Image (cartoon, rainbow, N blue to C red):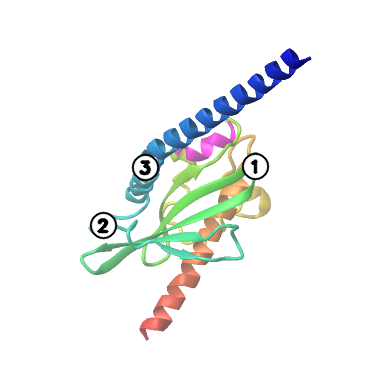
Amino acid sequence: MSKKKDTFINMVVSLLAITIVAGFSLGFVNELTVGPIQKGKIERKINALKLVLPEFDNNPVENVKLIKSDLAKDSVEIYSAEMGSTNVGTAVIGSSEKGFSGLIKIMVGFKPDGSIQNIEVLDQKETPGLGTKMKDDKFIEQFRGKNPSTFNLKPKKDQGEVDALTGATITTRAFGEAAQMAYDIYMKESSTTQSKNE
């Protein structure tokens, strides 16, 4: 009986030791990877900003503005691009939870007149070959140069002006909703900034 008890205690002690070593190892590896992961995220944002905004000479990431909105779960990120001291564009991250596979997150670059410079897809889990075509230039080009105040971002099937992705109308709706959200926040923020400057 005492041999069984000793064996059980040895197993518990061994398991405890393994758990402690594994926990410290995971913590150490996590500490090593946090910096590079964060740096990679920042680089991806800078690259996306360069794709959606006109040429700029400031660092929009340093001056990111986070605002709360009823339209999004998290704070919405707004990046202002400047050349010298003149605003040349603003990028807003828009999102929609209504994609075929959930969240779609895009960065929309706006010119000072409110028209869309470009759009970059940041996050999506849509069906390969169907919904993932939202990243294709052929789809995104129909948004460039358009001002959402006069261009309806919904698919044509919903009385909008966007040619839907074949077999991915739900994705197209969510993409348009994310772009509309970005525009609404951009306009609200622009009017707030303008009224402060007056």
* Element marked by disc 3: helix
Give the number of the disc on residue 49: none
Q: Is residue 73 left or right of residue 44?
A: right
Q: Is residue 30 visible?
A: yes
Give the image location of residue 22, x and y in percent: 52, 28
The residue carrying mark 3 is 35
User: Crowding at label 2, few (<14), some or many (≥20) Cα neighbours within 10 Å?
Assistant: some
Q: Nearer the viewer, residue 28 or 75?
A: 28
Rendered location of residue 12, percent (x, y): 66, 24
* Secondary structure predominantly adopted by residues drawn in magenta: helix
- Give left or right: position of 129 versus 157: left
Secondary structure at badge 2 equals loop
- Dividing the picture into quadrants, the one containing residue 38 is top left
Residue flagged by tag 2: what amino acid is it? Phe
* Classed neighbour count for the residue bearing mark 1: other residues with Cα under 10 Å, few (<14), some (14–19), many (≥20): many
Q: Nearer the viewer, residue 112 or 141?
A: 112
Q: Quick one: 174 or 146, which is closer to the camera?
A: 174
N-term-proximal mark, 1 vs 3: 3
Residue carrying label 1: 169
- Circle 1 — which element? helix
Quarter of the image with the C terminus is bottom left
Mark earlier in primary sequence (3, 2): 3
Q: Residues within 10 Å of mark 3 (few under 14, many from 20)?
A: few
Distance from disc 3 to disc 2, alpha carbons, whole Å, reads: 27 Å
In magenta, the rendered stretch is 130-136
Name the image quarter holding residue 90: bottom left
| Marker disc for residue 56 | 2
CA–CA distance in space, label 2 to label 1: 35 Å
Identified at 48% across, 39% down, the residue is 135
Q: Amino acid at mark 3?
A: Gly
